[in-house]
Amino acid sequence: MALLKLENVTVNYGSINALSGINLEVNEGEIVTLIGSNGAGKSTTMRTIMGLKHCDGGKIFFNGEDITNKDTRVMVQKGIILSPEGRQVFPRFSVEDNLRMGAYTRPDQEIPETMEQVFQLFPKLRDRRKQIAGTLSGGEQQMLAVGRAMMAKPRLLLLDEPSLGLAPLVIKEIFDMIDKIRDMGTTILLVEQNARVALRHSDRAYVLETGRIVLSDTAQALLNSDMVRKAYLGGL
Ligand SMILES: Nc1ncnc2c1ncn2[C@@H]1O[C@H](COP(=O)(O)OP(=O)(O)OP(=O)(O)O)[C@@H](O)[C@H]1O
Ligand SMILES: [Mg+2]
């Protein structure tokens, strides 16, 4: 049984159709990537899974249970956590306070241990734990955003464009850390425009074009696919 399953999911913004009956599965322990151009519906998919956007048709299952249109708080309690597009750290709060806010559903006494695990994943955040988040570099803020999501001990981590706007070396750091998070036992659904790097770090992937899944396969097969290379990897 898949950990996450989207069955024929349709989402509209008013009269605009953003997702037209998409089917997608993520198995426990996998890294699965959703690739697609601007406006394809990637963030909409993430927000709908999280219950932040209403699902207008179809069903979403988590661990076999129908979670369609449940409250976002319910998703968080079940272990689904979103690290949203554009980082969205709390700029006036310290690194440590941002991390603590990610753990709001967890018992207080467990927070120090989880924070220690996050600091092991991101040693840079430990060095800067008293720094005001708004003064961190873009890459550091992205690490903080992912670290904050990890504070909730997710079973399924949804990462929306973690590499957006970052330099190649920082992108590498972010993806190394994504591998480590998976090795710690967290399942990951990743959204990326940076298709080449994402596919190299994924088990499987789906290609989304204007609200429809047009292709899905192992990441390796998609890296070799003419269509994907032409449209998403900068040529053949
Ligand atoms: N709040 C909204 N109101 C109306 N239309 C929206 C809203 N949010 C998204 N859309 C539309 O839904 C479609 C999918 O948007 P979405 O943000 O999911 O795309 P995306 O694949 O994440 O794009 P990007 O790569 O630019 O982040 C787009 O046509 C977008 O204009
Ligand atoms: Mg998006």
Image (cartoon, grey):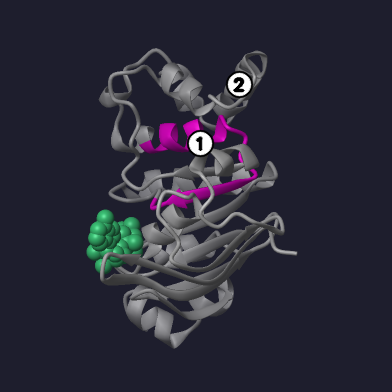
Residue 147 magenta-drawn? yes
Query: What kind of element bears circle 1?
Result: helix
Please give the range of residues in magenta: 142-161
Asked if residue 225 is positioned above or below residue 196 in the image, the reply reads: below
Is 133 left, or right, of 152 in this rendering? left
Quadrant in the picture for the N terminus? bottom right
Could you classify mark 2 by the number of other residues whose Cα lies within 10 Å: few (under 14), some (14-19), or many (20 or more)? some
**Dot label at residue 149:** 1
Quarter of the picture for ligand 1?
bottom left
**Dot label at residue 116:** 2
Q: Nearer the viewer, residue 212 or 34?
A: 212
**Quadrant of the rendered structure where residue 84 is?**
top left
Could you classify mark 1 by the number of other residues whose Cα lies within 10 Å: few (under 14), some (14-19), or many (20 or more)? many
What's under tag 1, amino acid-wise?
A: Ala
Place of residue 138 in the rendered image (x, y in percent of width and height, measured from the top left):
30, 37
Q: Nearer the viewer, residue 49 or 88?
A: 49
Place of residue 234 in the rendered image (x, y in percent of width and height, measured from the top left):
32, 75
Is 92 left, or right, of 25 in this rendering? left
Residue drawn at point x = 33 percent, y = 26 percent: 90
Which mark is nearer the camera, 1 or 2? 1
